[in-house]
Amino acid sequence: MLLDGRAVRSCVTHAAQASGKKVTTIEGLERGGRLHPVQEAFLREQAFQCGYCTSGMIVSAVGLLAGKPDADDPEIAGALAGNVCRCGTYPRILAAVRRASAAMKKERA
């Protein structure tokens, strides 16, 4: 989940740590019926199989790109390192984050 825009692991974050902060989960990323660019990129790149890691990967990527829109592959991998993909779709996940970064740059332009 995101706490005030920063990715944190919900499984180890106490409720008290979220007090007074904006909490965003995977469900809260869409706006006006449109998926977040990272969600859209995951679909286009087929960056998931079983879905086990998908929400954590997406939310972590959103947090990364919010603070570092030009993240390179090592930075992306570092930001996603706390999430484990059982299916091994890491190359497609990296491609999805790069695609989302490019789409977000276009939206800002």
Image: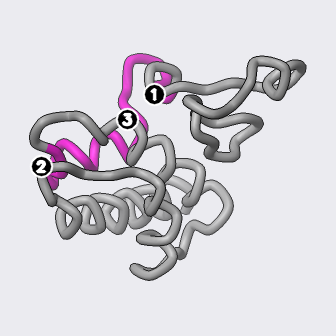
Q: Amino acid at mark 3?
A: Ser
Mark 3 or mark 1, earlier in chain: 1
Mark 2 or mark 3, earlier in chain: 2
Q: Which residue is mark 2?
A: 46
Q: Amino acid at mark 1?
A: Ile
Mark 2 or mark 1, earlier in chain: 1
Pointers 3 and 1 in contact (C-beta within 8 Å): yes
Is 89 colored magenta in this rendering? Answer: no
Q: Position of residue 44 (x, y in %)?
A: 16, 49
Q: Quadrant of residue 8?
A: top right
Residue plotted at (61% across, 26% down): 24
Residue plotted at (53% across, 25% down): 25
Q: Quadrant of residue 43?
A: top left
Q: Position of residue 12 (x, y in %)?
A: 63, 33
Q: Quadrant of the C terminus?
A: bottom right
Taking the image as shown, residue 4 lies to the left or right of residue 85, namely right
Identify whether 22 is placed above or below 42: above
Q: CA distance from mark 2 to mark 3?
A: 14 Å
Q: Which residue is mark 1?
A: 26
Range shown magenta: 29-48
Is 33 colored magenta in this rendering? Answer: yes
Q: Nearer the viewer, residue 37 or 42?
A: 42
Taking the image as shown, residue 89 lies to the left or right of residue 83, namely left
Q: Which residue is mark 3?
A: 55
Q: Nearer the viewer, residue 83 or 104?
A: 83
Residue farthest to the right, as pictured = 20
Residue plotted at (62% across, 55% down): 66
